[in-house]
Image: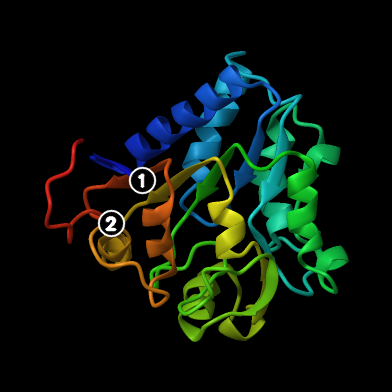
Amino acid sequence: MKVIILENEDQVAITSAKIISDQIKNKPNSVLGLATGSTPIKTYQQLIKMYQDKEISFKNITAFNLDEYKDIDPNNDQSYHYFMDHQLFNFIDINKNNCYIPNASFYNNPQQYDELIKKFNGIDLQLLGLGINGHIGFNEPNTSFDSLTQVVDLTQSTIKANSRFFDSIELVPTKAISMGLKSIMNAKKILLLATGINKADAIYHLIEDKVTPNWPCSILQNHNDVTIIIDKNAASKLTKKKAN
C-alpha cells in the first residue's frame, strides 16, 4: 500500500488525475472503475482538462461504475448515471456504449455485472472514494469480504451523509446496487481518494488498524497494488510517518 499525503484537495485531484492519465497513456483501451460522490469531482475536472489539452483520449476506454441507487430514474439529477454524464462523460470522447452502471437491468441477478466485467478481462484501475463509516462503494460495515455485486440497504449514517445532495432526507434512496468487496478487490490496481477531517477515522482504520468487516475499507490492506491519496486533514489521525 502506497500512501501519499498532500496539502489540500486540489493537489489530491492533480496527483490522482495524473495516475489515471498515465494508465490511459500506457494502455489506451484500459478498463476503468469509476466512483461518484464529491471527492472525485475535481479529479474528473483535471481529466477533462487533460482531454481538452489533447494529452489523453478516452475513445477506447471502457468504464464500469461502482454503484447506483436502486429504483432511481437515470435522468434524475441525483442518479449516478446523471452524475457521470455531467461530471465527466459529456466532456470527453468516451463512447457511452462502453460505459456501464449497475442499473435496473441487474436487479434480479446483480452478479451478472461481475460476469460482464470478466468479459473485459477485469478492471485495470479502480477509483474509490471513502465513506465516513469506512464504506467503499456502498459496502457498509459488516459486509462480507467475499461479496460480489449485490443490492444493499444503506445505513442511516450513509443516508444522512448523502442527504446534502437531496431536498430532504426523506428523498434519499434507502437501497442501492453496488459492486461487492470481492468485486473491488479483483481490480488490478486500486486508487482511493479521501479529503477532509471527517474522513480521518476511516483513513486510520484503512491504513493502521487491523483488517475487519467493521471497517470495510480495511480489506484494501490485502490488495497488492493500492495507492491512497489524501490531504493533511484526512491524514490527521495517522500515527505513523508516511511519505509525502
Quarter of the image that includes the N terminus = top left
Q: To which quarter of the image does residue 215 belong? A: bottom left
What is the three-letter code of the residue carrying label 2?
Ile
Task: Please tell me whether residue 167 is drawn above or below residue 129 in the rendered image.
Answer: below
Under tag 2, what secondary structure? helix
Q: Is residue 154 visible?
A: yes
Residue 149's spot in the image, x, y percent? 69, 65
Under tag 1, what secondary structure? strand
User: In the displayed image of the protein, which residue is found farthest to the top?
Assistant: 54
- Horizontal side of 203 relative to 88 (left or right) equals left
User: 188 and 229: which one is in front?
Assistant: 188
Cβ atoms at labels 2 and 1 below 8 Å apart = yes
- Horizontal side of 179 relative to 159 (left or right) equals right
Task: Please tell me whether residue 54 is drawn above or below residue 181 in the rendered image.
Answer: above
User: 85 and 135: which one is in front?
Assistant: 135
Task: Please tell me whether residue 178 is drawn above or below residue 10 in the rendered image.
Answer: below
- Horizontal side of 231 relative to 188 (left or right) equals left
Disc 1: CA contacts within 10 A as few (<14), some (14-19) or many (>=20): many
Residue 161's spot in the image, x, y percent? 47, 73
Q: Residue at x 48, y 44 (%)?
A: 190
Q: Residue 44 carries which label?
A: none
Quarter of the image that includes the C terminus = top left
What is the three-letter code of the residue carrying label 1?
Ile
Residue 45's spot in the image, x, y percent? 54, 35
Q: To which quarter of the image does residue 171 belong? A: bottom right
The colour scheme of the drawn protein is rainbow
Q: Which residue is drawn at 65% across and 77% down?
A: 152
Which is more foreground, mark 2 or mark 1?
2
Instruction: Say which residue label 1 marks.
Output: 228
User: 230 and 85: which one is in front?
Assistant: 230
Q: Distance between the residues labelled 2 and 1?
A: 9 Å
Instruction: Say which residue label 2 marks.
Output: 207
